[in-house]
Structure formats: C-alpha cells, structure tokens
Image (tube, rainbow, N blue to C red):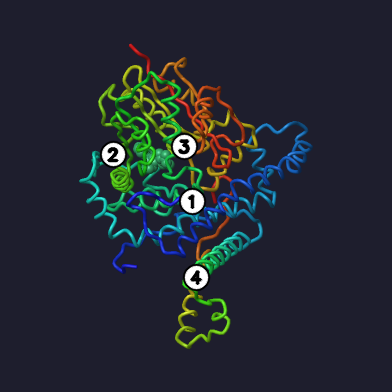
C-alpha cells in the first residue's frame, strides 16, 4: 500500500484516482515480490539448465540470461505487466496534479515566507540532454524545466505510488538511511554543510536536515520545476533546506565549502562523462576530511548474472539509457578518477532506517557489506547500497 | 476540474516495447490491466458506499436490487462507459512498432 503524502503540497485526488493509485501500487508490490520470485524460480528450474546444456558451461553474463529469458513466457508477462504498471503510476496521479496546479504556485509562494529554507533559480542554465531530451522512467514530460512546479508534483505523487510503501511514509527512507548510516558509523564526524546533488523534490535532502539539525543543508538540480516543488515541500515540513538550480558537473560553489556531498539514485541517470565530471566537482567543493556518499544500485561486479539482468531491466525497458553503463563500472575507479585516494574509498549496505529497530540498524551499520539478489532493489527484504570516499586531509 | 488548468502529458515520448512476438498481445496486456484497474476502482467505491450507507442505517443493498434507472441516468452511464472504453483501448492509438532488446527499432 502506498503511504499518503503528509505535507501541504499533496494533491487532492478524486476517490477513483485514489483507488487507481492503490491498485497500481499493489500491482507493483506483486510484480516486484511475487512475480520477481516466480520469474527467478522459472530461470533456475528451466531456463538456466537448458542454457547450461546448450552452452556446455555455466552461465557467465547477464546478456546470456537476458537472451534466454526474452524467449520465456514468464519474462514476457512480467515485463509487459511491469511496463504497463510504470505507465499506470503516472496516469493515476496526473489528473489530480493537473487539477491542483492552479493553486500549487500560490501555495508554494505562501510557504516560501514561512521557514528557514530558500530557493535560487538560474533561468540561464543550460539543461543537459539527459533531462531535457528524455522522459526518463517513462515519466510523461520528464523532469521538464518549466514555469510551474508540475514536474515536481508528478514526481512526488508518482513516487508515492511507485515505491509501493518501500520508501517510507515521507518517501525519504534513502536519505534517512544514508544520513543515519553516517551518524552511527562515524560518530565523531559532525558535518556543518551538506549538499544533495540531483535532489529532485528534495525529499532526501530534507532527511539529512532532520538527521543533522545543526547542519546547513543544500540541494541542487537542473530542473526549476522540481526545485520549486522541493522548496515548498521542505518549507511545509519545517525543514530549512536551500535549493539551487545548478548543474552537478559545474557547481557554482566555492572550493572546499562542504563537509558532505550526497547523491541518491542520481548517478545512473547521467552519462559516464557527466558522472566523471561530477566526481571531479564533488572532490573540489569538499573540504579536506569531507565525505562523498552516494546511494545507488549495486554495481554488476557484486552480483550474480541473473541479478545483474534483473536490475538492468530498467535500462532496456524503462527508459533508463545510462543505467547499465553506470552499473558496469567499478565505483571505486570512478571516484579515484575524480581525485579521491583509493584507500579512502568505502562501500556499504544498510537496512531501511524507517523499518528497522535501532539496535539492528546499528549492528548492520558496523557489519561488512552483504550483497544478494535483494540488494538495492525494491522488495520486501531490501537493503540499500552506498559507496563513497573521504577527501584527504591536508 | 478547472477548465483553465494547464494540461500535462500523460504518455512518455517514444515507442512502447513489444515483449510478445505475436502482434497485438502487448496491447492486450494493457487492456486487461486497465480493465482490472477499473474493476478495482468500482469495487473500492462500492465498498465505501456500503460502508457509508451502513453508518447511516440505510438498507442500501435491498434498494439497489429494485432501483429503476431513468433515461437521463442511462445517457450519463453511456458517457461513462465511452470514457472507460477510451482507457481500455488506449494503446491502439499509439505507435506500436517492435523495439528490440537494445531499445532500437
Ligand atoms: C532520479 S532523480 C534523483 C532522485 C532523488 N535524488 C531521489 O533520491 O529520489 C535524478 C535527478 O537528477 C537531475 N539531474 C540530472 N542531471 C543533472 C545534472 N547534470 N545536474 C544536476 N541535476 C541533474 C534530474 O533533473 C533529476 O531531478
């Protein structure tokens, strides 16, 4: 079941739309748990043995898995139903967002004067092609950098349905899990300035503000539409976050001006070239002794061929063209290329902060990372993957 | 809805992938899912209606059985059915050339 959004910008959907949202959310829950398990069993019981017979050896790559699964009826229905469910997520929320739009700007203006956050837009910013030219994850209109907060509203309302409850009541479980990972794992580290890059509706940036109430928290994105919404949303929740329209590959912040640079589900929407440019920028704006921390999908090198194939479904069928190229990288090499020392790289997995009790969370934070088919994907026993590095002290 | 409200796109740009070799099967899946959604919408609404009626002590179920639908209501229901058909068959109006695993035509 989706959680209802709990801030003032939430759209008032009609009853039938709410029922459609409930339905598609449950449908996604069913696809991601039940059908996913059924499909894996199908692979193990039938597709893999046949494949091994024809190859005369063990399966080695996700491409072999993909090619074989594409002929399988279970995969066809799984994919077709999942693709439809993705479309239905957006279709179920857009009418309510559309109806709410005339009031949305007024609401944001009103909220803008209540609270400690801010919004700075840059109308001259060049919007990169991965945002301007793509309806990423089939979101109609994409992150459209428009005059209204529409794209932000569609994203937020859509995410509430899409996440099928897996992202917690405020959709910010990733931000809460990552920030609390830092707080529990590095208790002597007290960040004063935190930056979330590619923050979209700012929900995870706001989570950092909650975890580190004494820190100054900033979020950047290239889309003005999502930032307008992010600003109103954070103000409504009483979390003082500063949102800026900026390109992560060309940050307008001074050298050595942040203690934490955070991203979540961001890198896989960038080209490799932009990822590399971003890490150089992240290294530049971090203070010596500062922390780069990225929540992402786990890299393919950590996973079995079937699990690689399962996660990269989005690259082929969900308009995520950069997804696999990112997941095929070794994250350690990526940040080293950005200027971080290899010895300062770290990676981890962490359970969901919103649904894990304190002791279990602390135990997990201090345990070595564990990878399996559930890592980084929405499912009932999910854990998040993260990696990052410390900028060398001088 | 406010008629002056700006319209948002509801379809993502680009072609939909085909998972089934047989022409039309992918669209059929969409039709079935749209149908299932609308069926659910209705069941949820009926559930709520019965609960509300119950709260007010109305013998709703019994009256529903004997209710006579008027001409005007019939016309309204027809309009609602046409809208529902539009949803059900929405994929037929979209470009549907197959796309291979690399997302290329
Ligand atoms: C998948 S969303 C990130 C989601 C968000 N961080 C979360 O945790 O849910 C990717 C975001 O990155 C933004 N984006 C893409 N390229 C960017 C760039 N070069 N600089 C800054 N933001 C960018 C997009 O506008 C979009 O809002």
SS at badge 3 = helix
Q: Residue at x 57, y 39 (%)?
A: A311
Residue at numbered disc 3: A268
3D distance between C-alphas at marks 2 and 4: 44 Å
- The mark nearer the N terminus, 1 or 3, is 1
Question: Which circle, 3 or 4, is nearer the viewer?
Answer: 4
Query: Would residue A130 appear left or right of B22 to someone viewing this image?
Result: left
Chain letter of the residue beneath label 3 in the structure image: A
Kindly give the residue lying farthest to the top in the view shown. A394
Residue at numbered disc 1: A2
**Mark 4 crowdedness (10 Å alpha carbons): few <14, some 14-19, many ≥20:** few
Same subunit, tags 2 and 3? yes
Residue at numbered disc 4: B49
Same subunit, tags 1 and 4? no
- Residue B93 spot, x, y in % from top left: 50, 66
Question: Which circle, 1 or 3, is nearer the viewer?
Answer: 1
Residue at numbered disc 2: A243
Q: Residue at x 36, y 36 (%)?
A: A205
Name the mark on residue A170: none
Using the image as rendered, state which of residue A253 and residue A129 is in the foreground.
Answer: A253
3D distance between C-alphas at marks 3 and 4: 45 Å
SS at badge 4 = helix
- Residue A93 spot, x, y in % from top left: 43, 57
Residue A184 shows in this picture: yes
């Amino acid at each position: 079941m989706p959680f209802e959004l709990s801030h003032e910008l939430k759209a008032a959907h009609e009853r039938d739309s709410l029922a459609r949202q409930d339905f598609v959310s449950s449908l996604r829950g069913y696809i991601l748990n039940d059908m996913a398990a059924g499909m894996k069993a199908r692979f193990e019981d039938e597709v893999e043995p046949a494949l091994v017979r024809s190859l005369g050896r063990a399966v080695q790559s996700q491409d072999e898995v993909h090619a074989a699964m594409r002929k399988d009826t279970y995969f066809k229905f799984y994919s077709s139903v999942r693709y439809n469910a993705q479309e239905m997520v957006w279709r179920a929320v857009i009418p309510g967002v559309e109806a709410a739009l005339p009031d949305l700007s007024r609401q944001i203006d009103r909220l803008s004067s209540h609270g400690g956050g801010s919004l700075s837009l840059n109308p001259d910013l060049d919007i990169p092609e991965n945002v301007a030219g793509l309806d990423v994850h089939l979101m109609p209109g994409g992150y459209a950098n428009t005059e209204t907060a529409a794209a932000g509203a569609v994203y937020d309302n859509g995410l509430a349905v899409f996440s099928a409850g897996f992202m917690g009541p405020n959709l910010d479980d990733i931000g809460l899990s990552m920030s609390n990972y830092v707080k529990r794992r590095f208790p002597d580290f007290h960040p004063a300035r935190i930056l979330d890059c590619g923050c979209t509706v700012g929900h995870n940036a706001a989570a950092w503000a909650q975890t580190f109430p004494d820190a100054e928290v900033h979020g950047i994105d290239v889309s003005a539409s999502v930032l307008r919404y992010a600003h109103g949303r954070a103000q409504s929740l009483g979390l003082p976050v500063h949102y800026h329209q900026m390109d992560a590959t060309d940050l307008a912040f001074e050298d050595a001006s942040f203690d934490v640079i955070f991203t979540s589900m961001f890198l896989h929407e960038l080209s490799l070239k932009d990822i590399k440019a971003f890490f150089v920028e992240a290294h530049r704006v971090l203070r010596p002794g500062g922390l780069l921390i990225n929540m992402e999908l786990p890299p393919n090198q950590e996973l079995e061929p079937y699990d690689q194939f399962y996660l990269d479904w989005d690259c082929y069928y969900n308009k995520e063209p950069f997804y696999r190229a990112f997941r095929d990288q070794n994250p350690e090499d990526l940040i080293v290329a950005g200027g971080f020392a290899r010895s300062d790289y770290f990676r981890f997995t962490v359970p969901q902060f919103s649904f894990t009790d304190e002791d279990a969370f602390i135990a997990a934070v201090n345990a070595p990372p564990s990878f399996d088919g559930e890592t980084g994907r929405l499912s009932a026993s999910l854990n998040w993957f993260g990696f990052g590095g410390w900028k060398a002290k001088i | 809805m406010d008629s002056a409200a700006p319209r948002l796109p509801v379809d993502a740009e680009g072609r939909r992938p085909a998972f089934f070799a047989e022409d039309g099967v992918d669209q059929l899946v969409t039709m079935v899912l749209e149908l299932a959604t609308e069926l659910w919408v209705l069941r949820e609404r009926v559930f709520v209606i019965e609960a509300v009626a119950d709260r007010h002590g109305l013998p709703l179920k019994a009256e529903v059985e004997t209710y006579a639908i008027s001409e005007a209501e019939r016309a309204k229901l027809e309009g609602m059915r046409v809208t529902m058909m539009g949803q059900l068959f929405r994929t037929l109006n979209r470009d549907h050339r197959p796309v291979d695993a690399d997302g290329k035509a």
